[in-house]
Image (spheres, rainbow, N blue to C red):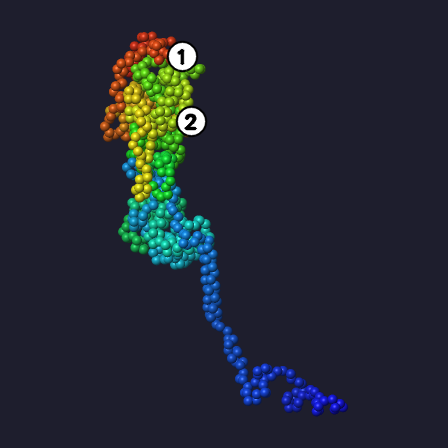
Amino acid sequence: MANGRGRGDRGEPNFDVPEGRHPGSSRLDLRLSRDDRAGGAGRRDKPDMKPSPRRTPAIKKGRRRRSFLGRIVYAGVVLGLWGVIGLAGLIAYHASRLPPIDQLKVPKRPPNIAILASDGSLLANRGETGGRVVSIKELPPTLPRAFVAIEDRRFYSHLGVDPVGIARAMAQNVTRRGVSQGGSTLTQQLAKNLFLTPERSASRKIQEAILALWLEHTYTKDEILELYLNRVYFGAGAYGVEAAAQRYFGKPAKAVTLAEAAMLGGLVQAPSRLAPNRNLPAAQARAAQVLAAMEDLGFAKPADVKLALANPARPARSGGGGSANYVADLVIDVLDDYVPKFESDIVVQTTVDTGLQGAAEKALVDELTLKGARYNVAQGALVSMKPDGAIRALIGGRDYALSQFNRATTAKRQPGSAFKPFVYLAAVERGLSPDSVRDDSPVSIKGWSPENYSRDYRGPVSLREALALSLNTVAVRLGQEVGPKAVVQTAQRLGIASPLQANGSIALGTSEVTPLELVGAYAAFANGGTGVIPYVVSSVKSAEGKVLYKRPEGGLGRVIEPNAVSMMNAMMHETFVSGTARKSEIPGWDLAGKTGTSQDFRDAWFIGYSATLVTGVWLGNDDGEPTKKVSGGNLPGEVWKTYMTTALKGQSPTMLPGAGRWRQRGPAEAPAVTGSTPGGLIGALLGEPQPAPAKVAAANQRARGPSQDDRNFLEKLFGVGE
């Protein structure tokens, strides 16, 4: 043994199980008890420490599961919290895509142009909105209440977004009971109209709600409602209640009845489907729902509702062919000359008389309706103005709804013999008179041989007779005598602005002109020789009444000498006495004018005037198709007489300027046709023989007017003549 290697004795390991520790067991138990763990009760270095009580029961108690209801509540709270966080983030995201709140502004409404007649009544509205801005104070209380009742009954209590209304709308959609109210408030609808696109998306709805809250914070309830009423769309190009009231009922919004207010209130849900001029039964049914809602909320008395239901609103009938729109189009065409820029509503006062406008439209439309098919004529135009150029009536076509082309101002057509007064004026300004004689006989100019309408010839005739009977050969001779350039210059001096060709045929009106400029040129004869520029705008004001433009007095100054005016009025008066316009004579009135018919009866004209009114009528077809012998003396003359009889009614007849002096033969000039006279000169230039003295005497007799036999012949020949 190695007893000497260490100090003391060392026992060897013994794995025998001590007896008595595990009685009856011969196996070694190596499991740890609680006392064997660090910090356990089995620490033997501190014999005075008592063992800790067992914690097993406490652990089991802490792990007891929650009830099912508790778990639901807990999950709801968590989900709600996350929902709020998510919603806040979503709102923040969409808000970031809007302009900064401090920079938000309600966009300006496109300006409206209210076009008024001379008496202040409304002719038409122009602009993107179709009507002016109205204050909520101007409106009858039932009108704004109708919108609140059917669109947003909690309008005055919510803050821009109405959760109750949204829930109710959702419930009605789910149960399929129909929707009497939408989920969007009036404020939300306004926000959409002002700032957003019409797209349907969750993003737009969130932005709509944000903007609605901003509107409610910025404006009062009445201000929001007023903005809404002036911006909402009612169909047919009408934005705002004023435009809608005018469009559907022909009256201002301040004058609508309870039944009409209910119809307007119900219209905004579906303007196209519920428009009363397109689907009256649907519009009236919707209006009944509005009335019921108004009664339920106390916005209308039961008796008033009952009366409105018994007498439902109906759209106003369109007044004829809507000719006032031709006037409105002319106003818009010239407005830039008076007010180049404007950013708010303006009011344009015109010279048009509503009574005369209606009479002119009726006269033209009735004639075309009665005789248009028989004579193969589909269109017409009428222009009527005071001798100073102020337009009193303007009809640009048969029906504005079918054709917006303004034939009175834009269509250029050959005036035919209606152009001859400029030829005769050029002649009298060079020394001739109504009693000067020229030869009515065949004429040929470089192979061109114009003929008279009657295809016969009368020999020597006075200028008075030649113009009254519209003899082509005499007009051509006079045109060659004074020169085509002189004829063109004379017409331009009186106001013809269209290009004119200075050739031989100019004497027969082959260069095209518009009805407006031709009537304007005739005005110089009616007013005694002053040139005019036809005008329709007398003043322009802002909506607040500030004058932006006022037409100055005066015209172009004298363009015809008084003696020449006197001679021209005497000669053109003769057309009503013995010539082509005699069927259009109005008893008691001193009238003058000229008929005109272009080649192949494509255009028919009648231009006539008193001392107080100048009116021109054109009839024809837009494509230039020949009519069935419509000439100036028949259909246009009938339209002219019908209109002028109404227009002159109640006025005191007045003599035309200077007409009395030349109604008979001139005071000094003896009519003669000799080789030494201008007539003889043109005859010699044309290589024609000069008339004998006996023919001159016959011409002097005819200057006093045709015989009864001649009248009978003319009646038969020109019954539908020029």
Figure quadrant of the C terminus: top left
Q: Nearer the viewer, residue 655 or 146?
A: 655
The residue drawn where x is 71% and y is 90% is 7
Q: Residue 686 has which mark?
A: 1
Element assignment for label 1 = loop
Q: Nearer the viewer, residue 96 or 17?
A: 96
The residue drawn where x is 43% and y is 28% is 623
Q: Amino acid at mark 1?
A: Leu
The quarter holding residue 5 reads bottom right
> Which callout, 1 or 2, points at the residue further toward the start of the chain?
2
Figure quadrant of the N terminus: bottom right
- Of the two numbered discs 1 and 2 in the rendering, the one whose residue sits closer to the viewer: 1
Assess whether mark 2 and mark 1 are in contact (beta carbons under 8 angstroms): no
Q: Residue 90 has which mark?
A: none
Instruction: Give percent across and percent down for residue 455.
Output: 38, 16
Q: Is residue 569 at all visible to an observer of this figure? A: no
Residue annotated with mark 2 = 624
Q: Is residue 145 at all visible to an observer of this figure? A: yes
Classify 88 as above or below 251. below
Instruction: Give percent across and percent down for residue 462.
Output: 31, 15
The quarter holding residue 117 reads top left
Distance from disc 1 to disc 2, alpha carbons, whole Å, reads: 34 Å
Instruction: Give percent across and percent down for residue 28.
Output: 66, 85
Q: Amino acid at mark 2?
A: Gly
Element assignment for label 2 = loop
Classify 73 as above or below 57. above
